[in-house]
Amino acid sequence: MLLFQFEGIAEQWLSADGFRNLCNLRDLFAHPQTDEVAERLSDPAALTASLNFYRANVPPASWVRPPSAPPPPVSAPVMGIWSDGERFLTEESMTGSAAFVAGSWRYERLDGAGHWMQLDRPDVLNDLLLDFLAQAGDIRSFASP
């Protein structure tokens, strides 16, 4: 992910030779639709926008500066969903997220899916989300002023 921080360089490296490098990362990211993603990212604006997600969430300076104070607990209802084929997040990390929630916490384990659970088990995931939203009610009332 560090490579993604280098604006312009990351775009050039990933898109070189028809997105060969992006497609070579397929095993690491386990994305089943790498070729389709490469096609959508062939628009330079789309590629930069996608990389900006990583740039905004993990700026390089965050790795060397002292840790900041933790944010306040989340007061809105929260549902954590973890899939048994997830390769980047442990189940303990997901269930441990409950410690950062002051509102209601719901945990669901989704079997038979990987990191891209929305692609692997869309019907089950949608059912979980719809049920959670119905039970949570109007979550807008939990928004910060």
Image (cartoon, grey):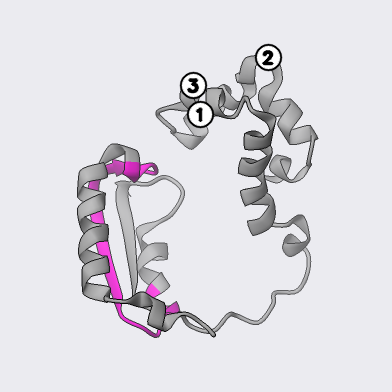
Figure quadrant of residue 79: bottom left
Residue type pointed to by label 1: Val
The residue identified by callout 1 is 37
Distance of label 1 from label 2 (alpha carbons): 15 Å
Residue 110 in magenta?
yes
Marks 1 and 3 close (CB-CB < 8 Å): yes
Q: Which residues are magenta?
A: 98-118
Q: Position of residue 96 (x, y in %)?
A: 40, 71
Marks 1 and 2 close (CB-CB < 8 Å): no
- Left-right relation of 52 to 71: right
- Left-right relation of 25 to 141: right
Residue type pointed to by label 2: Asp
Please tell me whether mark 1 sits on a helix, a strand or a loop.
helix
Q: Residue at x 58, y 80 (%)?
A: 71
Q: Which mark is residue 17?
A: 2
Q: Residue at x 34, y 64 (%)?
A: 80
* Quarter of the image with the N terminus in it: top right
- Left-right relation of 138 to 93: left
Residue type pointed to by label 3: Asp
Q: Position of residue 63 (x, y in %)?
A: 73, 61
Please tell me whether mark 3 sits on a helix, a strand or a loop.
helix
Please tell me whether mark 2 sits on a helix, a strand or a loop.
helix
Distance of label 1 from label 3 (alpha carbons): 5 Å
Q: Residues within 10 Å of mark 2 (few under 14, many from 20)?
A: few
In this view, the mark in front (1 or 2) = 1
Q: Decide: is 117 above or below 74.
A: above
The residue identified by callout 3 is 35
**Can the viewer see residue 130?**
yes
